[in-house]
Image (cartoon, coloured by chain):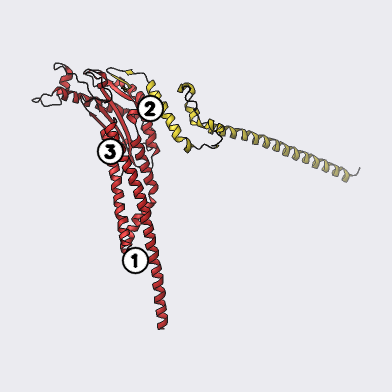
Chain colours: A red, B yellow
Amino acid sequence: MKKNLLLLFVVAGVVSSCGTQKRLSSATQKAIEVKEIITENNATLDSLQKTTLMNQQYSEKDSLLSISIMEVIKKLQDNLNKIGETVHSVELASGSKRNFNDRNYFTIMKPYIDRLDSFQTSSKARERVYGLLIEAVKLKAFVQFDLGTFFEAGVYRIPSSGLPIIAKSFNPVLDSVIQLSNRYTDVTHRLYLVFVGYADGQAINKEGKLYKDLSNFYPKNNLPEKEQLNLTLSNLRAGELLRNMKMVVQSRANDFAPKDISMISYAAYGRGEIIPFSKITDYKENDERRRVVVFYWSVLPVVRN
Amino acid sequence: MSTVAIYTKKALLSQLSLWIGALALCGAMLYYWHNYGSEKRNSDNQEIEAENISVDQLLLTSGDLELGNTVNLININLNKNNNPISNSSSPIQTKPQRSQKYSRILEYKIKKIAPKEANGFTIKPIPQP
């Protein structure tokens, strides 16, 4: 009887030890694989970060879009760091076989292993998110589409008769926006349409209607300077184009695959007398090339932490 | 001639005419079945041909593109027979090339848009240095 009990204990011990060893080696292998993916993804994100910074510094890209791209990269990096901490914990735990025995494995280690599993199984979805981000960073919308809305001196309003012209001119750009958005219907994403207005360096006649319109934005006891007025003028120009483009986008709502245009973020701001195209050096004070609204766009994945 | 012989003869004639009728029906059925099959094949072929029209052919013509001598490839699928290495050109392989071409076409079309002026504003290409 005693001999039988002893044999039973020995067999149970061997079986249990085998299970522990199997779990330990599987966890170690998973940690190695996840670590490799993290390294690879981190390298991609670093490269995208550098490209975005370079674009912001050396080419004429919108700063709002650059900030949005950097925010997405930051969130993805945070997610990688979190999973990196899990890998580190598993590596530490694998130092002791005890952590992987029947009792400790299910009470302590299982949640960590599950996190690694879920990270591995979501690799395809992650690849798509990275794919969209890579495309967004490489986009040269501003350079590629090459269209600007130029205003006559002192003008900022676009009459209703201008809407068909705006629609016709910007539809090719919208086609590209829709095409990229529709290719990533499986990735939660947001469209960004940004309008940046500029004004020339001319002074505004204090007797004119434009001066009255613009000075309404300032308190009466603090009359605005020429630069401030031109900043307001550039803001109004950008806002006016945005208002019209919203209508154009609305008319194309059915072309978007999810038929939902609520995932579009619009932004419009003015930069006043700042030079719009830094490569051009022969600007004058009264120069049509400075009375312009330029348009940027991007499609970025929505990343949750 | 006995009555039995007369009835036997009539029965044989009726049987023969029934057989002839049955055979004629079978012949007609076979004839129409054959015709229907060949018509169906023809219509199927037309459908297949229609499916094979590439997007390039539908969207673009050389006149529309106004391409110069430097660009001679419009439809990549049409070129596959001239290329001994790649006998099959899947859409995945041609995608980047196509997207490059579409980008160029788009760029070209945007540049072709005449400046539009409407009460104080103009939409036109951004000035280059």
Query: Which of A262 and A14 lies nearest the eye of the viewer?
Result: A14
How far is disc 2 from disc 1 in space, using C-alphas?
Answer: 62 Å
- Give the amino acid type for the residue marked by disc 1 in the picture: Lys
Position of B32 with respect to A222 (left or right) is right
- A14 or B5, nearer to the observer: A14
Identify residue for label 3.
Answer: A68
Dividing the picture into quarters, in which one does residue A162 lie? top left
Residue B99 at what x, y percent from top left? Answer: 43, 32
The residue singled out by tag 2 in the image is A172
Q: In the drawing, does residue B74 fall left or right of residue A50?
A: right
In the image, A95 versus A9, the foreground residue is A95
| SS at mark 1 in the image | helix
Q: Which mark is residue A252?
A: none
Total tally of numbered discs in the picture:
3
Residue farthest to the right? B1
Q: Neighbour class for label 3 at 10 Å: few (<14), some, many (≥20)?
A: some
* Mark 3 belongs to chain: A
Quickly name the residue at label 1.
A97
In the image, residue A223 sits, relative to residue A18, either above or below, namely above
> Residue B82: where, in percent of width, then height?
56, 31
Of the residues under marks 1 and 3, which one precedes in the sequence? 3
The residue mark sitting in front, 3 or 2, is 3
